[in-house]
Amino acid sequence: TIVGGFDETGAHVIVLDPLGSMIEDDYAVVGTGAEIAIGIIESSYRPEMSMEEMRELALKAIKASIARDAASGNGIDLLIFTDEGLKVNETINL
């Protein structure tokens, strides 16, 4: 499970694993294609990326997971949140 949100210190992304651990990082992936996606994200992520660059990186990682893992599905639901709330809510059918 991925939980994200904002507080007085800024944005947070936290992964809750099956054992109950909470791991905070700049990015997170979960699911059957996570190993493929995380490799792509780790190789290209930069903290100063624009929202559009992050969007493209997320799509690249998810598309690679879908191509290599039959359990990853065949579409993408993309939500982008900022400190002002939900900015993008799009469905991409592949």
Image: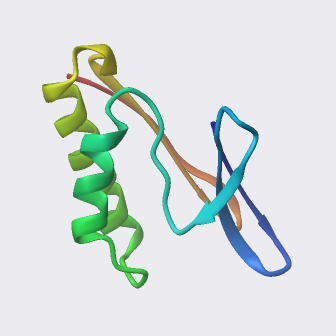
- At x 71%, y 64%, the residue is 84
Most distant residue in the front direction? 19
Viewer-closest of 74 and 39? 39
Most distant residue in the bottom direction? 48
Residue 44 drawn at (x, y percent): 23, 69
Most distant residue in the right direction? 8
Q: Is residue 69 above or below residue 56?
A: above
Viewer-closest of 26 and 92? 26
- At x 64%, y 40%, the residue is 17
Residue 37 appears anywhere in the view: yes
Quadrant occupied by the N terminus: top right
- At x 22%, y 68%, the residue is 43
Most distant residue in the left direction? 67
Indicate the colouring scheme: rainbow
Number of numbered labels in the structure image: 0
Quadrant occupied by the C terminus: top left
Viewer-closest of 3 and 50? 3
Q: Is residue 37 left or right of residue 9?
A: left
Residue 16 drawn at (x, y percent): 68, 43
Q: Is residue 76 left or right of residue 1?
A: left
Q: Is residue 5 left or right of residue 90?
A: right
Q: Is residue 47 left or right of residue 73?
A: right
Q: Quadrant of residue 34?
A: top left
Q: Is residue 52 above or below residue 47?
A: above
Residue 56 appears anywhere in the view: no
Q: Quadrant of residue 57?
A: bottom left
Residue 70 drawn at (x, y percent): 22, 14
Residue 54 drawn at (x, y percent): 36, 63
Q: Quadrant of residue 9?
A: bottom right
- At x 29%, y 45%, the residue is 37
